[in-house]
Image: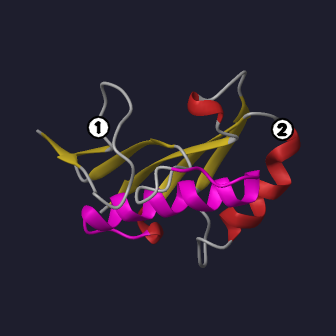
Amino acid sequence: MKKVICSPKAPGAIGPYSQAIEAGGMVFVSGQLPIDATTGLMPEGAEAQAKQSLENMKSILEEAGLTMANIVKTTVFLADMSLFADMNKAYATFFEGDFPARSAVAVKALPKDALVEIECIAVR
């Protein structure tokens, strides 16, 4: 059985998908673009965009009753690998203690011309 998780503090899905799905004690958070849910705008630069993507992820996890500490795996999508260091600066500030497993890949393009998109898997 699955449960849809949706937070008004994160931007709504821009396609036919859910912000997150919970199943079997795991929460799968869809890729979060760096869109501010209040303004609908994206900040400039990879560091600021990574921060906003992670804030969106945090809001969705909070809606599910979880925190960033529940994350076991993230996947970071970058418009270019040259953005890795800037993304990493913001990323490191969202976790205390052990970091989750992570993949980071460069892609040809991201929706809405974002520089960063981040998804995760969290466990109860």
Q: Provide the major secondary structure of the magenta segment.
A: helix
Where is mark 1, residue-wise?
A: 18
Q: Residue at x 39, y 70 (%)?
A: 67
Q: Position of residue 83 (x, y in %)?
A: 82, 46
Amino acid type at image mark 2: Met
The span picked out in magenta is 41-67
Is 120 displayed left or right of 3 in the figure?
right
- Secondary element under disc 2, as helix, strand or loop, is helix
Sort mark 1 into few (<14), some (14-19) or many (20+) by Cα contacts within 10 Å. Answer: some
Q: Which residue is mark 2?
A: 81
Neighbour tally class for label 2: few under 14, some 14-19, many 20 plus, Cα within 10 Å: few
Q: Give the image location of residue 22, x and y in percent.
A: 24, 47
**81 sits to left or right of 2:** right
List the single residue furthest toward the front: 39
For residue 89, the mark is none
Name the residue located 59 percent from the left edge and 71 percent from the top edge. 94
Of label 1 and label 2, which has the lower sequence position?
A: 1
Left or right of residue 58: residue 86: right
Tag 1: residue type?
A: Ser
As helix, strand or loop, the secondary structure at mark 1 comes to loop
Split into 4 quadrants, where in the image is the N terminus? top left
Residue 27 in percent (x, y) is at 32, 50
